[in-house]
Image: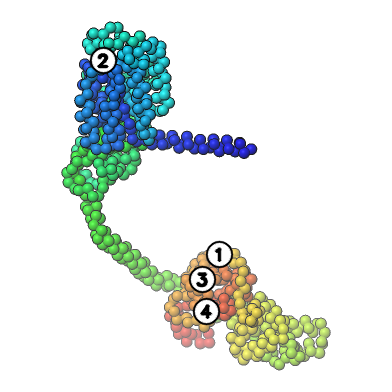
Amino acid sequence: MNDKKQLWLYALVIALMLGAATPLAQAQEKVDLVVLLDSSQSMFPYYNQVIEYVVSGALKEFMRAGDMFHLLSFSDNTQIEIAQSLKTESDVKSALARLYLLYPLGRSTDLLSTLRFVYQYVSDLPEASAKRIILITDGMHAPLDGSPYASFTPEQVRGEIEKTIGRVKERGWQMSVVRVPFGRDAAAGGSGPGELGSGAPGAGDYLGDVASALGVIINEFDPENGSSVLDGTVGLLRMSFPADLGDRDYSFKLPLELTNPGSRDLSLQLSALLLPDGRDALAAKAFLQVAAGKTGSMNVSLRLPPDMEEGAQRLVLEPRFSDGLRVSPARADMTIRLKRSPIASFFKNSARVLIFVGLLIVALTLIILLISYVRSVHKRSASPVVDAVLDAQALRDSSKKPAYGLTARDEERRQELSQGASAQAILAAAAQKPRGGALSSSYATPASAQLGSAEAAQQRGAEQAAAQAALLQAAGGSSSRGDAARLLSAAANGAQERDRLRMLSDQASKGDGSAARAALLLGSKKDAQGALRPQAGRASYEYQGQVKKPGAARFMLHVEGQNPNIGKRNIKTLHAGGKKSVGGRKSEFLVFLLPLPQRVADIYYDGDNLTLVPRRPEFFPDYDGPIQDCLGQAVRIINARGKELFISFERYVPPLDKINKLLHCIESPGA
């Protein structure tokens, strides 16, 4: 099992190494260009042209800064003529000067020795750079008698060529072949196909065998057009560009045309445009598809360094493609007249930038203030119209009420109280001294005292409920069945609560409304110290706004004990089906008498009445759901500190309408 794990681990490591090696090879930018130049006497008629068009052209157009140029001459032996690192322009000039000193003086050509020598030579070069080999010869193999290959037959020569070229291909090196026409005048004194002085049995033309082993075609050197050989040997793209760019800003588009002289389509990605100091002026990568033998154009985005001086000057850019392709010429040499735009000139100064930012902030602030002022003016101008419409609507609604200051519901309650015993009489009965210490005995009638039976107890309970309901009416007209039920449960909690309720009843019978309301507190939850606390952990109530009839009205929030002289802060307009928040902080209806969270409840308007929906039910311990028809009803709230407060909502009546109605009362005495 361990052996299998080790095998998988080795396989994974090898796969990672192979995967990492491929991008590295593709990312190579530096090149070792090795030129094998035949310097035998048969090359004499075309030697200078070969130097001029092939070697010199490859050196000037193909090579880039950081590349290595190697020139090896061969005839009966092989010699290293140039091994020059090209870092500066002076290095290129030095290599070119050395080229023009060469001269073909070799008596014969030992092609096999040359191939073996170049393989060993390139193997010793650093592996970090790509290897390009160009073989330039007339194709003759004619070794001297002292050569180790002098006795090789043609079959042995071909076998040795395949063996050596196979090793070159295994290393991934690129090798091109250039044939120069055979100079027969130079070989006039020789015999057979060999060169001067060669009698080897295997002498002959083997250049076709070299090309076949490499899998490439032979590039024929044309003395009339020697520069065309470069297209087949090093595969240079042809680049054209405008010689004069004219007046330009520091950011502009540079038009480029690229011609693909090769036999395969190319996908180009321009990744950099280097200035002479090495800085990249390319603002964004550019892409182009160029078919074989076709020309394509691209507009390249440039951003020149801001420290370049303005005015006419020379602009030199060296293109770099991501796949290592090279172009001819190697650099775009253009003239340009740099001129900054007014905006760029302005922002070049940091002090001006700060001033501009400051002015921009001031301008934006003024615009925001102006918009706010216009809105406030519009709101103030529209407010009297809206108020007049709402006041007229409120006046029409108030004319339908049974009596001034009473809603229809208030009138119904008043009639119900007038049909039975008056609230004052019931309160007086509730204020009598209890007999036996029980709260229920203070409401006992003579008949129930004589009976002492179950029926009498039921009658006493009914009378007690009626008295407590009247007590709630005296507390401000906010009684409900739920309030009465809570008061009944409070009365049964013990003798202490009953004594307190009896005391409050005595005070209520004397007209103390606050004492009557305090009786409601007996139904609230208390903590260990006896202080009132909201019941936390209760979920908020779900409620969907309704529209009984369309319209809008203004309502005012009244908080008992809170200063009402705060303008129209707590006077809001509610549309049918709409709502507003109630609570502390930034609530629309604001309670600031005691600390409350924001939006403890929402108030809904249905076009007829209001509904208060607790969003924080723990602050409303007396209610188990939305409080329906709460217009004019006192609602108790317990804050987080156990303090109570009472809120109510009423229709807002402008003070002027109140004065007008008061004056009109004189016209109708007794109304």
Q: Residue 107 carries which label?
A: 2
**418, 280: nearer the viewer:** 280
In front: mark 4 or mark 2? Answer: 2
- Mark 3 is surrounded, within 10 Å at the Cα level, by few (under 14), some (14 to 19) or many (20 or more) other residues, namely some
In front: mark 4 or mark 1? Answer: 4
Name the residue at 23% across, 18% down: 105
Mark 3 or mark 2: whose residue is earlier in sequence: 2
**610, 277: nearer the viewer:** 277
Residue type beneath disc 4: Leu
Q: Which residue lies furthest to the left in this view?
A: 312
Name the residue at 59% across, 86% down: 514
State the image coordinates of residue 341 (x, y, percent, origin top left): 22, 50
Residue type beneath disc 1: Gly
Q: Which mark is residue 598?
A: 3
- Residue 398 position (above or below residue 446): above
Q: Which residue lies furthest to the bottom in this view?
A: 433
Spatial separation of the CA atoms under disc 3 and disc 2: 106 Å
Res. 648 image quadrant: bottom right
Name the residue at 59% across, 89% down: 512
Q: Which mark is residue 594?
A: 4
Mark 3 or mark 1: whose residue is earlier in sequence: 1
Spatial separation of the CA atoms under disc 4 and disc 2: 116 Å
- Mark 1 is surrounded, within 10 Å at the Cα level, by few (under 14), some (14 to 19) or many (20 or more) other residues, namely some
Q: How is the image coloured?
A: rainbow
Q: Which residue lies furthest to the front in this view?
A: 146
State the image coordinates of residue 317 (x, y, percent, origin top left): 26, 39
